[in-house]
């Protein structure tokens, strides 16, 4: 996986701006620690940082061909690149490398903007067509790989992460009313395309942005389509199994060490088992798997987010499948050390200690593997979250996972809240999201509502999870692949009726039955259990002390937004501050408060 960045400018000769483009690319060094490259022309300039995974010696970028040049800077993995290569060769194309990068480039030369429709993979890339003087920015179907852009007076800037755009003097870190609403009211349901900073956009999943002198346009190349599901229960289970198995096998493609992330739930265990079967068929060795744990986790009482410790289920799955398993145990002090690294990785306040523990897990995984397969997105695709099964959440006139939960927006100063209007902003975003649901003719009542909730989950809940995994993994140069996001599987599952997804009312029963033969019964039937938060007593105390320091600091920038007295009273009364996360965690809101202050200082964020 890699980092991409660049600059298009119709008024500046960018051949004289190599130092700036290099600086933009250098901010992405953690995404691509193996190599770097810069390409300059009069009106377009590209930068690239490479993590070598396929064709280690032949995949250097930016990659160009022809006169006037067509040039590509690419971040991704194309799982069907070998089939596309053969098709393109039959059409007369010749290749200089084994890389999927060159397949993407040649596909665009052959098929233009229709090329992305043929891709199966995770990708975010920029392509400059020198003949048409057009820049294309393209992002994968589900938005697994990120790509940000900013339109300036004479062109655009773009990058895999905001930090790359921020490295160009044409862009300033500013927060306006919409950005404040996204940060405080909708951190768990961010608006598609919104880059948080004022003037910063993100290419939406399944979309392409075209930049010409005359206009900047964004349009979809892929979207969900609702149609009647005609397969019976047995055929549906069989198709889900076949699609998932094919996705896993394709995603084992790698010229570097590969592993799986194993939590002991049905999602990650199924991925691990299917990977083991595919490796066995191809004569390869055992799968390596990794899990995360914390001191004292076995003694924690279950709650409505965590049904119990992962460790017994991880052991059962690893032994049953026969993996080479490593449990990464993360002490309290290590979480504190990781906070700043995570803030820099995400370019925004995130999920606190959950981000920090993920960073530390990925750092350990990276010591032995460059690529990891994850069970992320199964709950969004098959309806595993509690809100899919709660009548109150389903009937709430808001994003179901936000029902009954205060957000950090309640902490805003009265005058800021009056300007931002977080409740109205959230309500409008919810209405807009509902309006975008692809309807099925004749579908009404509960079935229609469940379809709406699935669409909300895929477009408003899944993106921040994928963003978190990408940014935290790439901060240590680890590529995480997500087979449940294979767009063919998502398209198929989208139209499976709720009754087939939950046979006998069992959450995610379709998936469980499709992979049951691969797993111990206790794992296949394990109830949903969220990503673990740590019982970190010292972590909580350090954040509490930091919050009191902020209250005593009259210049603390967080209180330009947050009401100081509201926070003071809450801490004095031992109340829990509202968290940006939906998972119950008493330290989540405190973490967010401190992170916002650290972020405003570190990024010198101006308020508009």
Image: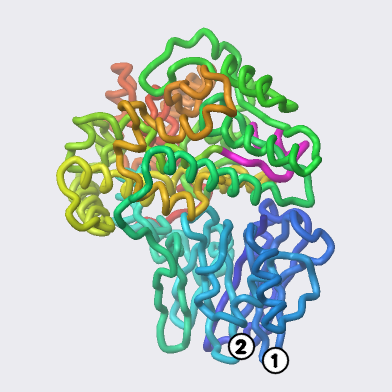
Q: Reply yes or no: does residue 373 show up in magenta.
A: yes
Q: Reply yes or no: does residue 33 show up in magenta.
A: no
The C terminus, quarter of image = bottom left
Q: Is residue 518 visible to us here?
A: yes
Which residues lie in the magenta part? 360-374
Residue 67: image tag: 1
Q: Is residue 322 left or right of residue 44?
A: right
Q: Looking at the picture, how far across and down is residue 604, in whole percent? A: 49, 53
Q: Which residue does the numbered mark 2 point to in the structure image? A: 130
Q: Looking at the picture, how far across and down is residue 226, in whole percent? A: 31, 57
Q: Is residue 537 visible to us here?
A: no
Whether tag 1 and tag 2 are in contact, CB under 8 A, the answer is: yes
Q: Secondary structure at mark 2?
A: loop
- Residue displayed at 71% across by 33% down: 364
| Label 2 CA crowd tier, 10 Å (few <14, some 14–19, many 20+) | some
Q: Is residue 313 left or right of residue 197?
A: right
> Between marks 1 and 2, how big is the CA–CA gap?
8 Å
Rendered image quadrant of residue 121: bottom right
Q: Is residue 596 left or right of residue 281?
A: left
Q: Is residue 335 above or below residue 46?
A: above
Q: Is residue 202 above or below residue 239?
A: below
């Amino acid at each position: 996986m890699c980092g991409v960045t660049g600059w298009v400018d119709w008024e500046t000769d960018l051949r004289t701006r190599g130092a700036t483009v290099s600086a933009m690319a250098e901010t992405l060094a953690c995404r691509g620690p193996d190599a770097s490259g810069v390409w300059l022309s009069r009106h377009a300039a590209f930068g690239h940082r490479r993590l070598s995974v396929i064709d280690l010696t032949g995949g250097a970028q930016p990659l160009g061909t022809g006169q006037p040049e067509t040039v590509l800077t690419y971040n991704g993995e194309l799982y069907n690149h070998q089939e596309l290569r053969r098709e393109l060769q039959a059409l007369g194309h010749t290749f200089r490398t084994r890389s999927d990068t060159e397949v993407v480039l040649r596909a665009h030369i052959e098929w233009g903007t229709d090329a992305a429709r043929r891709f199966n993979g995770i990708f975010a890339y920029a392509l400059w067509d020198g003949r048409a003087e057009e820049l294309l920015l393209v992002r994968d179907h589900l938005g697994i790989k990120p790509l940000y852009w900013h339109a300036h007076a004479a062109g655009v800037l773009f990058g895999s992460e905001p930090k790359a755009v921020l490295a160009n003097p044409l862009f300033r870190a500013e927060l306006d009313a919409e950005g404040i609403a996204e940060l405080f009211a909708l951190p768990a349901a961010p608006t598609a395309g919104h880059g948080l900073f004022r003037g910063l956009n993100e290419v939406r999943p399944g979309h392409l942005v075209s930049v010409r002198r005359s206009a900047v346009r964004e349009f979809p190349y892929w979207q969900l389509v609702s149609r009647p599901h005609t397969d019976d229960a047995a055929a549906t289970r069989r198709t889900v199994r076949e699609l998932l198995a094919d996705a896993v096998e394709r995603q084992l493609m790698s010229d570097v060490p590969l592993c799986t992330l194993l939590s002991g739930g049905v999602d990650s265990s199924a991925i691990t088992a299917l990977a083991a079967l595919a490796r066995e068929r191809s004569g390869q060795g055992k799968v390596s798997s990794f899990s995360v744990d914390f001191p004292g986790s076995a003694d924690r009482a279950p709650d409505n987010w965590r049904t119990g410790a992962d460790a017994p289920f991880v052991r059962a799955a690893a032994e049953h499948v026969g993996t080479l398993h490593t449990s990464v145990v993360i002490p309290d002090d290590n979480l504190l050390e990781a906070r700043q690294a995570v803030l820099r990785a995400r370019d925004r306040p995130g999920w606190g200690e959950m981000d920090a523990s993920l960073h530390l897990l990925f750092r350990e995984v990276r010591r032995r593997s460059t690529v990891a397969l994850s069970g992320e997105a199964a709950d969004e695709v098959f309806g595993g979250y509690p809100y899919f099964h709660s009548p109150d959440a389903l009937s709430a006139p808001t994003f179901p996972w936000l029902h009954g939960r205060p957000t950090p927006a309640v902490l805003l100063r009265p005058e800021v809240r009056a300007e931002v209007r977080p409740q109205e902003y959230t309500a409008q975003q919810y209405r807009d999201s509902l309006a975008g649901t692809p309807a099925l003719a004749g579908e009404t009542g509960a079935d229609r509502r469940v379809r709406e909730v699935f669409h909300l989950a895929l477009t408003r809940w899944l993106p921040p999870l994928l963003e978190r995994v990408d940014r935290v993994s790439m901060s240590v140069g680890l590529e995480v692949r997500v087979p449940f996001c294979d767009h063919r599987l998502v398209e198929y599952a989208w139209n499976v009726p709720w009754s087939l997804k939950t046979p006998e009312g069992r959450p995610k029963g379709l998936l469980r039955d499709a992979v049951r033969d691969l797993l111990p019964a206790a794992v296949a039937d394990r109830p949903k259990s969220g990503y673990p938060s740590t019982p970190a007593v010292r972590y909580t105390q350090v954040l509490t002390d930091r919050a009191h320091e902020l209250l005593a600091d009259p210049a603390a920038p967080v209180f330009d937004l947050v009401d100081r007295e509201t926070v003071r009273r809450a801490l004095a009364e031992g109340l829990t501050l509202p968290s940006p996360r939906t998972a119950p965690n008493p330290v989540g809101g405190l973490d967010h408060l401190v992170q916002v202050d650290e972020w405003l200082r570190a990024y010198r964020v101006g308020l508009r």
